[in-house]
Image (cartoon, rainbow, N blue to C red):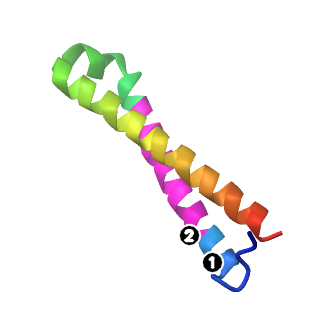
Amino acid sequence: MHIEGLLDVGKEEQRLEKRIMSLNQDYEAILKKLTNTNFISRAPADIIEAEKVKLQDVNDRLQKLNRAKAYLVASSE
């Protein structure tokens, strides 16, 4: 299905890319925290588990956005 004319493909691609970049930064920050031995040794287990859940959530959202971007690009060709 071609989506040209239904939405501004360039603007939507930029919006998705901006969100992907933001989530990548979030992912890196959480990963850095989870690989910090001081954090792991001092933080309560429930906090560490919450960070792991956040990391998985961010990863899932990144995958969805990357799929959406790939679909958008493929549909506009």
User: Going 70% across and 55% down the picture, which residue do you hit?
Assistant: 70
Circle 2 SS class: helix
Residue 37 lies left or right of residue 23; in this view the side is left
Picture coordinates of residue 5, whole percent (x, y): 70, 86
Q: CA distance from mark 1 to mark 2?
A: 6 Å
Residue 70 lies left or right of residue 49; in this view the side is right
User: CB of mark 1 within 8 Å of CB of mark 2?
Assistant: yes
Magenta-highlighted stretch: main secondary structure?
Answer: helix
Give the residue type that dot 2 points to.
Arg
Q: Is residue 26 magenta?
A: yes
Residue 6 lies left or right of residue 37; in this view the side is right
The residue indicated by pointer 2 is: 15
The magenta region covers 14-31
Position of the N terminus by quadrant: bottom right
Residue 40 lies left or right of residue 73; in this view the side is left
Give the residue type that dot 1 points to.
Lys
22 to 47, vertically: above or below = below
User: Going 75% across and 73% down the picture, which residue do you hit?
Assistant: 2
User: Going 68% across and 64% down the picture, which residue do you hit?
Assistant: 72
The residue indicated by pointer 1 is: 11
Q: Is residue 55 magenta?
A: no
Res. 47 visible in picture: yes
